[in-house]
Image: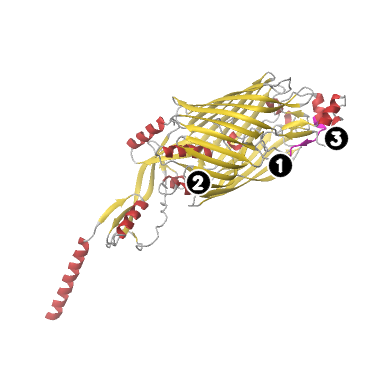
Amino acid sequence: MRTLALTLSLLLTSFALVNSATASELIDHGRFDRYNDAMQTAENLRAEGRQITVFREPVTRDGFAVQLPYYQLYIAAEWAAMRLQREGFQAWVIPKPESLGYVIQVDIVPTREQVADVRQRLDLLGHRNIRVRPIRWKSYQYFVQETRLEGMPEAIVEAPDAPKPAPEQPEVESFTFGDDSVLTFGKQTDYDTLLVQQDKDPSLRNQGFEVDDFRAEFGFLDAKTGGLVDSSHYGLISMGYRFVSESGFDGRIGLRVDAVRQAPERAVREAEVDYGESFLRYRAGDHKYTVGAQVINWGVLDELAPGNVLATQDLTRYTLDDLTRRYRATPLLRYEGWFDRWKVDVIGLPLFRAAELPEPDSIWFPIDSVTGRIIGLPNDPLLAALVQNSTFETDIEDDHGGGGLRVSHQGRGWDFGFSVQHVRHSLPYFELNPDVRLALLTGTPPNIAPTVTASPTFQAIHPFTDVVSLDFATVWGDTTWRAEVAYLSDVPVTTPDLRVVYAPSAQIGFGMEMFPGDANNRLSMQAGFTHLEPDEPILDREQTAYISGEFEWLFAREAWRLRTRFLSTWSEEGTDYYLNPELAYIRVEPDEFYIGVHIFEGDEGTPGDYHNEHDMFVLGWRTRY
């Protein structure tokens, strides 16, 4: 018994000594908020031959997200984010747009003092659309120790030579924001998870499948006014897959499907498949090389931009959509380079792509073969007889589209740029067949003249023009001011004897954008003037002035959005206007359910007069994710 008791005593003493020695060897190498920082520290210590374990424990973090909202085009937001990165910000574009457009995530900071510092730096750069949202999310804290003791949190155990894993994505259960009150939206969107991906490579954030635009819209016209159409419905799905590689290559494959149904008479039932933005791009530091198809956005104005002649316009729905949805992807070769605050953008168009037009029977086609009218021209019986018996050709021969160079400078609160282009007009201009023209001039009745030839009566043309443009943007007070001017060497026009000639054109536009009241209101207005300088009398309008604008108001805690768009033009021939008020429920973001009205009015011979009977009430659903 004595021997057994002595043996047990020695074993207990040895266990106590070993346990005591083990506890005394516990070394804490720090606590880290970022997974990458913890793993890097662990790898450095393992390289010294130490036995290292990384632990994690759940924490709830509070902070402030500083953002810049209201970028309608992704490429514009990406450009602004790149500018902020050059100023030392961790800026990146949240890939899913909000109800008012894309958002730049400038930074996430823990204190209001740091918020004030970020706001001051943004203010010096000229940004006024700053939004600060208090946020709270569930995350982890990581700490590194040389031993593992029982009762500690779950350990992340790795072999010393194990490859470094990709950063973990926190499993966010809720996201809160507001000023003093807290609104919890749960997992309504992935926006909360995107906010805390600060460790992730920015170039890898926006990859995978994405739906750029999905719409189902029902439109109803008042057929009692004399029109032959009482409904015009529309559907759209635009989607793509974006991929990124660590070698500097990234790209996208895009596809869109447009569906139209118009009834009862002049029925149109069409579903058209088209390519969207599809490209392969290589990034090498401050240089990007792109081949494929992209939406081109040169200049600084949103509506009727004089310097964005390269872009392919979409006229399938006339002005029913805002300008951000009225461009199509253009096949191109592109180089973009950044040199300090200067950017050089060179585009070549190996294939010309004309503007997309609706079906000839559509009420949005610029020529009405039923009534015999052409948009922008007065209602004339002789013209009506000619148009009603004519054929129209919109197809063109394959040809290159030219190209252009734009150089821009990004300053502190002011930007400017200039471009030179040799391009073809995207918008079609219809030229009268020479044989038909000769028949008309020799007295052949308009309803008979089209029969003198088997060729189309009118042919769409897209002549080349040389373009020089200048643009400028600055901030004064709480308002962003923009200006743009362009000179086009050859614009097609028609003489009284029905010949097509070319005249130079000068175009100028001014714009302003402000956020009256608070960040939930946005007002944008633009005004411009176009002047043609022909060598002989023409039938086209020589001088045209316009004013356009958009006002957006979010209310009921950002659950509803009231938006009103308008466009009005003046010339010697008359005045017209277009008005589009819309009310949308946006609480179930990114889905929007909306009702709206499109109203057209104008003097005889104006576009508003041409669409006078096309006032339309719409209701629909749109989303992007």
Q: Indicate which disc, 2 or 1, sits on the residue closer to the N terminus.
A: 2
Q: Tell me where residue 457 sits by quadrant.
A: top right
Q: Does 358 lie within the magenta span?
A: no
Q: Does 390 lie within the magenta span?
A: yes
Q: CA distance from mark 2 to mark 1?
A: 31 Å
Nearer to us: label 2 or label 3: 2
542 displayed left or right of 555: right
Question: Split into 4 quadrants, where in the image is the N terminus?
Answer: bottom left
Q: Position of residue 86 (x, y in %)?
A: 42, 38
Q: Indicate which disc, 1 or 3, sits on the residue closer to the N terminus.
A: 1
Q: Residue at x 22, y 64 (%)?
A: 22
The three-letter amino acid code for the residue at tag 1 is: Asp
538 displayed left or right of 98: right
Image vertical order of residue 167 relative to residue 437, above or below: below
Residue located beneath label 3 in the image: 453
The three-letter amino acid code for the residue at tag 3 is: Thr
Residue in front for this viewpoint, 440 or 148: 440
Q: CA distance from mark 2 to mark 3?
A: 54 Å
Image vertical order of residue 398 relative to residue 56, above or below: above
Residue located beneath label 1 in the image: 398
| Number of numbered callouts drawn | 3
Residue furthest left as drawn:
2
Label 3 element class? loop
Q: Tell me where residue 421 sits by quadrant.
A: top right
The three-letter amino acid code for the residue at tag 2 is: Arg
Q: Which region shows up in magenta?
A: 387-395
| C-beta proximity under 8 Å, tags 2 and 1 | no
